[in-house]
Amino acid sequence: MRVKVSLPTDNDYELMHEWRNHPRIRLASRSAEFITYEEHQIWLKKVMFDPLVCLFMFCVGKNRVGVGRLDIHGVHAEFSIYLNPEYIGKGLGLLCMKELLRFSFSRQGLVTIYGETFATNISARKTFEKAGLELLQQEGDTKFVSYGISKKTWIRNN
Ligand SMILES: CC(C)(COP(=O)(O)OP(=O)(O)OC[C@H]1O[C@@H](n2cnc3c(N)ncnc32)[C@H](O)[C@@H]1OP(=O)(O)O)[C@@H](O)C(=O)NCCC(=O)NCCS
């Protein structure tokens, strides 16, 4: 099964709103509040015109299977990822994560990427680790853990 990255269309923006409000995705998000369509539109307008934010869909053929985001800081970026709730728990997260790494390093020219999740989010942690990301040293809030990987390590692993 080949996962590919594609730019979102108008239909995808609606899907993102639906998926983002699914209980599984809300539980994994910093803000677990329900997001209204108006709030979603305001957020979308902000990120769509921000050259430092890259928002994309993960696709398998014509199926939309997840959403990825890169918040770019020079040659580094913070990533976030969530699956179409229909596909959660089926192992697709790893394929999407691997594609996110390929996209970040070979198409976006990034040098490191990193991401944060709740320490209790075992699915995310296992997915990040299987994709080759390393747990980063963290001070302070132990509710969250951060994972990262450099392009150098990614190339060595692939
Ligand atoms: C995180 C996410 C992308 C992972 O993708 P996924 O395909 O659903 O991952 P899975 O549920 O198959 O879990 C990955 C691994 O963790 C294991 N796992 C999950 N929960 C577990 C638990 N409680 N105890 C032990 N292992 C667990 C799974 O068995 C699987 O292991 P395997 O690869 O050896 O089979 C997806 O679950 C998701 O979109 N979650 C909501 C959003 C989110 O959490 N995003 C990450 C923060 S940015």
Image (cartoon, rainbow, N blue to C red):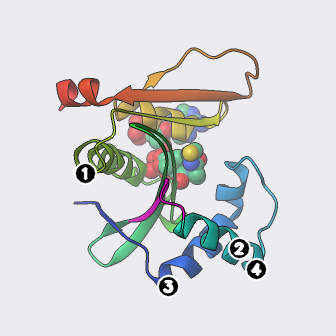
Q: Which residue is drawn at 61% across and 71% down?
A: 44
Name the magenta segment's main secondary structure: strand
- Determine the CA span between mark 4 and mark 1: 32 Å
Mark 3 burial class by Cα count in 10 Å: few <14, some 14-19, many 20+ = few
* Image spot of residue 130 (x, y percent): 37, 32
Question: Which residue is denoted by mark 4 in the rendering?
Answer: 38
Q: How crowded is mark 1: few (under 14 residues within 10 Å), some or many (20 or more)?
A: few
Cβ at disc 1 under 8 Å from ligand 1: no
Q: Earlier in the sequence, mark 4 or mark 1?
A: 4
Residue at the spot of label 1: 107
Q: Which corner quadrant of the image does residue 118 belong to?
A: top right
Q: How far apart are marks 2 and 4 (CA)?
A: 6 Å
Q: In this view, does 94 lie above or below 140?
A: below
Marks 3 & 4, CB-CB < 8 Å contact: no
**Gap between marks 2 and 3, in whole Å?**
14 Å
Residue interval drawn in magenta? 50-57
Q: Give the numbered dot on residue 10.
A: 3
Residue 9 in view = yes
Q: Which amino acid does label 2 sit on?
A: Ile
How many angstroms separate mark 1 from mark 2 (CA)?
28 Å
As shown in the figure, which amino acid type bears the numbered disc 1? Arg
Kindly check if marks 1 and 3 are in contact, taking CB atoms under 8 A apart as contact: no
Looking at the rendered image, the quarter that the N terminus falls into is bottom left
Instruction: Tell me the quarter of the picture where residue 98 sits.
Output: top left
